[in-house]
Each structure stands twice: as C-alpha cells, then as structure tokens.
Image (cartoon, coloured by chain):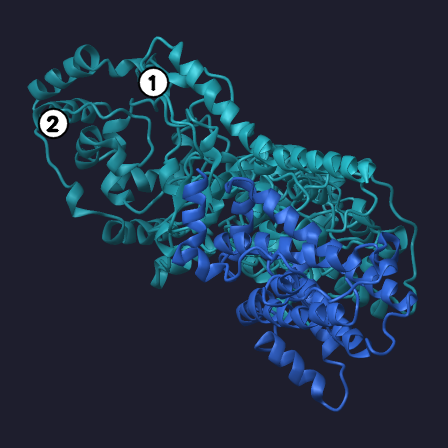
Chain colours: A blue, B cyan
Amino acid sequence: MKESLRALTRSQAWRSIFRHGLPLSNRTRAEAVFYNFFLHVHPAKVRKRSVKFTYTWGLGGLSAGLFIVLVLTGALLMLYYRPSVQQAYGDMKDLQFVVSSGQFLRNMHRWAAHAMVAIVFLHMLRVFYTGSYRPPKEFNWVIGVILFVFTVLLSYTGYLLPWDQLAYWGISVGTNMVRSVPFGLGERISYLLLGGNIVGENALVRFYVLHCFVLPVAAMVLMGIHFWRVRKDGGV
Amino acid sequence: MKPLRLTFAIVAVLFLVVLAVSPLKDYLREWKHDQTEYNRLVAGLPQRVKQVDIGIRQVWVRKLDRVDRCVTCHLGVKEPALHAAPEPFTTHPQVYHDVDDLGCTFCHEGQGSATEYRESIGKVKYWDRPILPRAYLEASCAKCHREKDVPQAPILNLGRKLIRESNCVGCHKLEGGEKQWIPSLDGIGEKVNRTWLVNWLKHPRTYAPSTRMPNFLLTDEEAGTLADFLLSFKTFPEEAALEPEPSQLTSAGADQKSKLVELGATRFREARCISCHPINGKGGYVAPELGKIASKVSAQWLYNYIKRPKRLQPGVVMPRYRFKEEDLVGVVAYMESEFVDYDVEQLPPHTPDPGFYEKGRALFKKYSCGGCHALSGMGRAEETGPELTKIGAKRLYEIDFGRSGIEQTLPVYLKTKLLTPHVFGESMKMPQFGFREDEAEAIAVALLGKTDDNIPPDLIVPDAPSGTFAPQGDFGKLVDDLACLGCHVMNGRGRLVATDLSLEASQARRAWIEGYFKVPYSLRPVLTERMPKLYLSDAEIKTLVDYMEMAFISDSLDHTVSTDPAAAAIGRGLYYERYGCQSCHQVGAKGGYVGPPLDKAGTRLTAGWIFHWLKNPQRLKPGTIEPNNNLSDAEADALTAYLLTLK
C-alpha cells in the first residue's frame, strides 16, 4: 500500500500536476499558496477583525455562491430551452411537465436569481456602512457597482426568456423606458436591444445571448478582478 | 467551535432533505399512479387488453403544431373493451375524427402539454384556453366546418341558424350571415299608428311573440321620441304613393260590411295566409304575426300592400295574390274587423317635442337601428358593435365581467351576454333578444368556434356556395312577383320551406301541376306550411309550367314502362307481399302513416320518377327515409306499372 502510494507520487503524471513536495518549511508553505492557481488569491496576511463573521456577514461569498448555482442550473436549463418564438414557451412547459426535476431546476434558477439581486444589494450596503469603499479600495468599489449593474441586467434579460405575457410586457415597458433617453439616443439603444422596433424573435435571441453568454462572461471577468483585489487589499 | 460544526451539520442535512424533495416529487407523479392503476384494471378484464409501459405518452399533431399528452392518463381512448371503465380510462365516444389525427386539445381545448389533471384542464392562472364544458364542445367543430349543416353538431347548427336569423351581422363584424335590411322603414309614417309604434319599440314581443326584433329596453321618453322621428317618414321607396282607401271600406253599411267580411274570410282561408303568417302564434313561421295587425297598420296601407307588396316594401318575400278587386277589399275588411288588439290602450293625443327630429335621429344612430332597417337619408349603419370574428380567442383578462357575479369563463360570459346583455353595465347598447337558455348556449357555441387558430387549408370544410340561379323572362318576373323562392328551392337558390323544384317536370305530370296551382290543398293537407292559392290566370300557369318543362327536367330520369295490366298485377304483388309497402304508405285509406299516401300517385308522378325513386330514393332526395330495397329493373318496372294505375 505504502509502496504503491510512493510510486504514484513519484510518477511523471503526479509530478506534472503537483510540482512540489509537501510544504515542510515556511518558505515552501508560502510558495504553495503563491504558485497555486486556486490559492493564489489568498492574501499574505489577514486581520483578525475582518475574519469576524458579523463584519462581512459572508455576503460577498453568498453572492459568489449564488452565481455558481445560477451558472449550473442555467447550463442545465439551456439543454432544454430554445430561444424561438415558436418554441420558447412550449419548452418551458416541457420543463415543467416532462423533464425530470425540470420544475425544480427552473425554480432554483429563479429563486437564486432573486436572492442574488437582494444579496448583492445587501453586500453593497455592508461595504458602504463599514466604509470599505475608502482608499485603497475605491477602484474595487467601482468594479462592485458595475457587477451590481450586471446582476440586475442578468435578471432583466432572463425575464424575457419564458416568452409569456409577463415577460413580453415587462420587456415592452423596459425598452419603452429606454426610449426616453435624451439626445435621440433612446430610440437607437432600444432598437439595438430589440433588434427591431417590437419585442419579437430578434429581441428574444438578443436577450438570450446577453443572458447566457455576454453578461455572465463579462461578470466572471470582473468577479475575478474583484476577488483578486479584495484579497490584495486585505479582505477575505 | 463545537456549536458551529453542529449547526453546519444540521444545515447540511436539511439541505439534503430539501434537495431530496424534488426527485421524490418526480417519482410520485400523478400519471405514474394512473398508469399503474390502468395496468391493474386491464389485467382484471376478461378481454385481452395490452398493458402500457410506464412513461409519458403524447400525440404529436404536426399539421396543427400541437403536442397533447392527455393520452398519458387517458389510456383507453381507442380501446373498445373499456367503454364502461371509470375515467380517465374510458373509451372515447364514437366520433368521426381520430385522436392520432387531430389530437385532443384541438377540439377539447385545455393545456395539452400538461401531465397533471389540474393543469391539463387549463383552469389555472396562466392558461387562456381552459377545457370546453361539454355543453359547448361543438364549438370546436366550427373551427374547420364552415358548411351550413355540420354532421353530428345540432347545437352548432342551431346557433348558426339563430345568428343568421337574428341578423347579428347588422351590428357585429362576423362571418356566416348576409346582412338583411328588412323591413325598410320608408313610409312607416303612412303605415302604422303612434300607439302601436311606441308600444312596439318598448316591448316588441308583446305584439308579436315570435318577432326577430329585439327589446332595446328604451325608456318611455326614448320610445316616444323615436316613434315621432320614425312617423315623420311618410314617403315610400321610389316615391310610391298610396292609392286611396276603397269606398266600400269607409262608407259601407253594416249589412254590406258583414257580407264583405264574410267574403274576405273565405278568401283569406283559401289563400292560405297562415301557411306563412302566424295568427296569435298559430300558423307558419316564415312571415310576421298577423293576429293584431288591424291595431298596427292602417286599412289604406293594408289594401295597397296586399295589392302590390313589393311596391311598398321592395324585396319582401310576399307573393302578389291575383285577387279580384272585390275579394281584395273583402280580405282587408275581414282583417280589419278580425285582427284587432282589444287590450291596447290608445295613447293620448300628443304634440311632438320641437327637437324630436334631431333627438330621434340621434337615438336611431345610438341603437344602430340602421343595422337591420333601411331608412332613406340615414344610410346603412356601420358595424357598431364589437367585432366577433375572433371572439372564441378572447382572453379572460380582456373581458369586463362588471358586477355580474357569474363564473368567469368565456362560454358563460357569452351565454349571459346573450340572455341579459345589460348585466355587465348599464351603458351596454346590445338589445335583449329574449333567447331561451338553450338558444343562448347554441349561439355561444357558434361564436366560441371563431378562434384565431391557424387551421390548415386542407382541414377546412367550406360552405357550399349559394346558388346564383336567376330565371329570366316571363317566368322570372312571375317568380319574383309570386316570391316563389321564399319557400321553394330552384337549382340551389331559395329557402327550403316547401319543396325543391329543380326536377319538378321530371317528377310531376303537366296536367297535375296545372291543376295543383288551382287547387293547391290537394297535396299533403295536414301540413301547416301549405302552398297558398295565388288565383293565377291560365296564361300565367301556362308560362310557369312551360318553363318547368324546359328547365326543371332531367333526361336521365326518363323511363317508360309497359302499362300492361299483367305487369301491374305483378307490381301489386310486390307492393303488398314482397316489400310490404303498405306498412308505411296508404292506398285506399289502408296502410301506414310514415310515408305519403299513394292513392293518386299515377295522376301526379311520371313513370320515370317512380322508377328511379324506387331504384334509389336517396339519389333524388338525399336524406329521405324511404329505404333503398335494391330492386331489380324488372321489379321496379312492375311496381311502377302498378303505382301508375292508382289514379
């Protein structure tokens, strides 16, 4: 047993993945953190008071966790959903009536989305009240605000996808509000969003692409920067 | 540290339980239970019925773009052995359509994609078209069946008939009816009196229980103003003027008058006015009620009208009787003395309000009177009511139920609207038609079929185009003057109250037809809607019959039989012994009552007609109950020879 374990840890495959031996000295321990992708965001040191639960309430972590839930359930939902006027609503009904645990998936996605908007907002409040937006964290606050906007946009673009009355009119109202942007820009932005003047097939595809690709990817990039900066600025 | 771990452990277990709920719910789905029940049921049947594999089943109707999963639980739909099984396993009642062909929700409505009972019947918040109640199911036939008589759909047919008759298209945009503007109101000021008109406007059914005129629930003031407005129209169409009332009517002594009335009564009976007109509810259904006519119209108008109906009322379906002047005066005198409404209270003399014309005009427009009545200078009303071409697709949120407190479904809404239009709001302009409950339901059925569904063209059963037959020349003039097409059909045109005349000359002998015009009650004396006696001249009868012999004849029905008494004797044997015709037909007052008596068959019918009728009755009259006995030519010849001896 011991022999075979040793043989495994000495194999080329093992060593190509785990390039160091066990971290036995302080230096190798530090290196293990610095040189590991998953651990590299850890700060070099953490203040005791910022580890305290009631200081952060774990809201940032919860937001990130919900994002992961949304990505996973969303990916599964994408397997059954087709963004076309003919099929969108029917696919949703199929999820409800035929797909195993399909309704559970939808509900999970929906409630996680609601929760994420609320928790990201609470997270912002917490940052505001603890003054964590002050230098040297002012740049990260800006990124955070942008992430909040992305969260809301993700919610909004997902709203159209069931293609029911609520979705249709919700998006109609929303894009009509966009139209009142001054200097003649409103009409253009609304046209760009909908791919036309009405909420139709083009709008559905555009919102689908925004919801499933553009916004999540952009959010993930910004989240990477956000987390990295949090750690570098001494947070958890 | 310890309590934190404990909390973590408990929360983790709780999460696991919550997550386990979903697969558990999935495992305990309703339809799985139903399918197990079904398998248990069919296992216990004496017949061999195949069990089903557990799983969702569906009908995909590609041409209708529908997926119906109803058959997941309704497993016995096509299994005759399960006709007595409980729902949801019962056999579907016999209908022409196949479930694999059209699916379920195309006819029944409801949510086809659902696999739960409550969701599938669609009485849930987010489904617009819930399942049709059984009483309204025929609505779906109307989606494809545009023909007048839809097989196996009596309620739909009744509804469509009522929509046509009630002239719904006068106010609503709607397919399935031609607009009618009868009667014209021009000259009404010279026709009726104010008391009658005011009462009529307020309660049309008090005067004529079977009238098509609905009750607009007018106030006394509105009825009075509208009556004043209408009575100001004293000119008849095309400037036709009334001839003066004959002096016998105005200045005859009592003795002379009673003689006149007696003569009129005889002529009135002979002319069979009640074939078309009901009198106090008894009589035909084709024309207006006459029971209280003398309290409605002036004697002068009545005299002029009977003399030449189409002059005062262009397009009316009333024959011009060839009464002698004396007979005509008699008929008017009889009607004036007999058909009086003794209950009516004369309104006090009245000077119209100075603005009556403008106000009356406004009322005429408001209630869209022009939708049904022509009145010169008013134009024909546009469709003032809501469009109904897609009413069956109306969403519930588009309907204002007001304070009616009814069940909030489309069928019930339509039915209630037809019965009591004003229950949804005082300002509703739709009048009260006084439909019976079953009539309102039938109309609702016909309306519910008008959906916005995309029907593939090959499924649509179109309505047969109405005939365009328009006889010309002397015959054409007579047909128009005598309003023949009001009761007879000729080459696909006309209203079928009496018979189809398209093959008349092949059916009946010339001498018989000529005689029939003179003594019309010789045939079918028990019917109400009998041929009236029109007092035609011999020349006119000749014109009519000549034309029939040219046009209403088919060479394919020619046939000659030998009039040999031996053949007739064989035919007699066939009649009484072999085919037992006497069980339905009478000869010499002996026999059944189902078919017409054959006593004078030889005088009336041609040999060709009898022969071809016996060979295949349904060919000559589709839908007749006379059985096709598959006679050989020789048998048909012999029977024809026998029937021709009955004179």
Q: Which residue is mark 1?
A: B49
Query: In the visual, does B189 lie left or right of A221?
Result: right
* Tag nearer the camera, 2 or 1: 1
Residue B246, percent from left and from top: 66, 54
**Marks 2/1 same chain:** yes
The image quadrant where one finds the N terminus of chain A is: top left
**What's the residue at 47%, 29% (across, down)?**
B527
| Residue type indicated by callout 2 | Asp
Q: Quadrant of the C terminus of chain A?
A: bottom right
On what subunit does the disc labeled 2 rest?
B
Q: Residue at x 82, y 35 (%)?
A: B343
Q: Quick check: B323 above or below A60?
A: above
Which image quadrant for residue B293?
top right
- The residue under label 2 is B637
Q: Which residue of the protein is positioned furthest toward the front in this rendering?
A: A25
- Crowding at dot 1, Cα within 10 Å, few <14 / some 14-19 / many 20+, comes out as some
SS at mark 1?
loop
> Is residue B21 shown left or right of residue B467?
right
**Up-down relation of residue A123 to residue B562 (above or below):** below
Q: In this orientation, which residue lies closer to the viewer: A184 or B501?
A: A184
Residue B629: image location, x then y, percent: 20, 23
Q: Is there any visible trace of residue B381 in the rendered image?
A: no
Residue in front for this viewpoint, B166 or B348: B166
* Front-lying residue, A85 or B29: B29
Hey, what amino acid is under mark 1? Val
Give residue A222's mark. Answer: none
Q: Quadrant of residue B647?
A: top left
